[in-house]
Image (cartoon, rainbow, N blue to C red):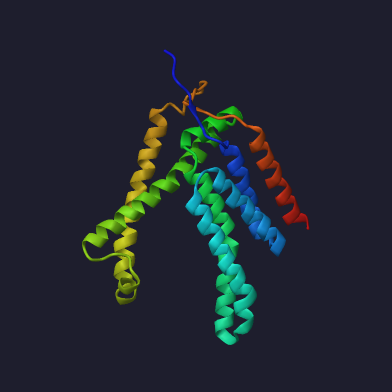
Amino acid sequence: MNREKISSGLLDPRSKLAVFIAACLSAFSGLTHPQEFVLLALCVGITLLCQKWKRAFYTGLIFAVMFFCDLFLAPRLSGILQNIIMLACHFCRFILPMFAAFYIVTQTSRIGEYISAFTQMHLPNEVIIPLAVMLRFVPTIQEEWQMVNQALRLRGMALTWKNVLRRPMQMMEYMLVPFLLQCSVIVDEMSAAVMARGFDKNMPRTSYAEVQMKALDWCIIAVSAGLLFWNLCF
C-alpha cells in the first residue's frame, strides 16, 4: 500500500536547531550591540520564514523598546530606578533571542519531522527517543498549564496579580499541585506511546513527514555557525 508523504514545509528542522544552538551559546558568551542585532535579525527572519508574522513583529518590537530604553531612558534616571530599568532591559535582551529560537524549534515543526530528520542522520534510538519526547513535552505542558489556569478561573482563582498578592501560598498550591501531577501523567503517556510505536525495536523506520536539506537550510546553518564563531572568538 502506497502512503502519501507529508511535506515538512519551507525549512528543515535541523536548520532550526542550528539557530537555537547558536542563540543559546551566543547569549551566554556576552554580546556586543552589533552581535545582538545580527542574532535577533536571524531569529526574526526564521520566524518570518515560518510564517509566524505576529510573533516576529512582537519579538522585534520588544527588542526595540528594551534597546531604546537602555540607550536613552536609563541615562536620564538615577539611583535605584535607573538600576531597575537597566536590569530589566539587559535581562529581556538576554533571554529574547533564546525564547525566539526556542519558539521556532518547538512550535513550527511537528515531532514526526524531527524524528525523520534524526533518523536520516543515523542517530541511535537512545538519542532520538529522549530528544523526541523532550520536544513534544514542552508544547504539552504549555497546554496543561492553560487548562489548569482555566479551571481555576472558573472557580474564581485565576492567576492574577490580585490573587497572587492576596493569597500567594494558596495560589502556588492550587497551580503547582495539579500541574505537576498532570506532568507526571503526561510523561507516562508519552513513554507508553513511544513503546507502542515500536521505537525500542532495532528495525528501519519510515515516516510520513518527508524532510530534506535545501540550499536555504544550508545557508541558515552556515550563518548560525558564522555568528557563533564571531560571538565566541571576538
Please determine whether, in this image, residue 78 is positioned above or below residue 137.
below
Quarter of the rendering occupied by the N terminus: top left
Instruction: Identify which residue is drawn at 60% across, 86% down.
Output: 78
Residue 59 horizontal side relative to residue 138, left or right: right
Q: Where is residue 46 in the image (x, y as percent from the top left)?
A: 58, 46
Q: In front here: 83 or 122?
A: 83
Residue 210 horizontal side relative to residue 191, left or right: right
Q: In front here: 105 or 180?
A: 105
Instruction: Identify which residue is drawn at 33% across, 68% down.
Output: 160
Please determine whether, in this image, residue 42 is positioned above or below residue 80.
above
Please determine whether, in this image, residue 11 is positioned above or below residue 224.
above
Q: Where is residue 47 in the image (x, y as percent from the top left)?
A: 55, 48
Q: In front here: 202 or 204?
A: 204
User: Residue farthest to the left?
Assistant: 155
Q: Where is residue 25 in the image (x, y as percent from the top left)?
A: 65, 54
Quarter of the rendering occupied by the C terminus: bottom right
Q: In front here: 7 or 191?
A: 7
Count the numbered circles shown: 0
Instruction: Identify which residue is drawn at 34% across, 51% down.
Output: 144
Q: Position of residue 227 (x, y in %)?
A: 71, 51
Q: Which image quadrant for residue 163? A: bottom left
User: Residue farthest to the right?
Assistant: 234
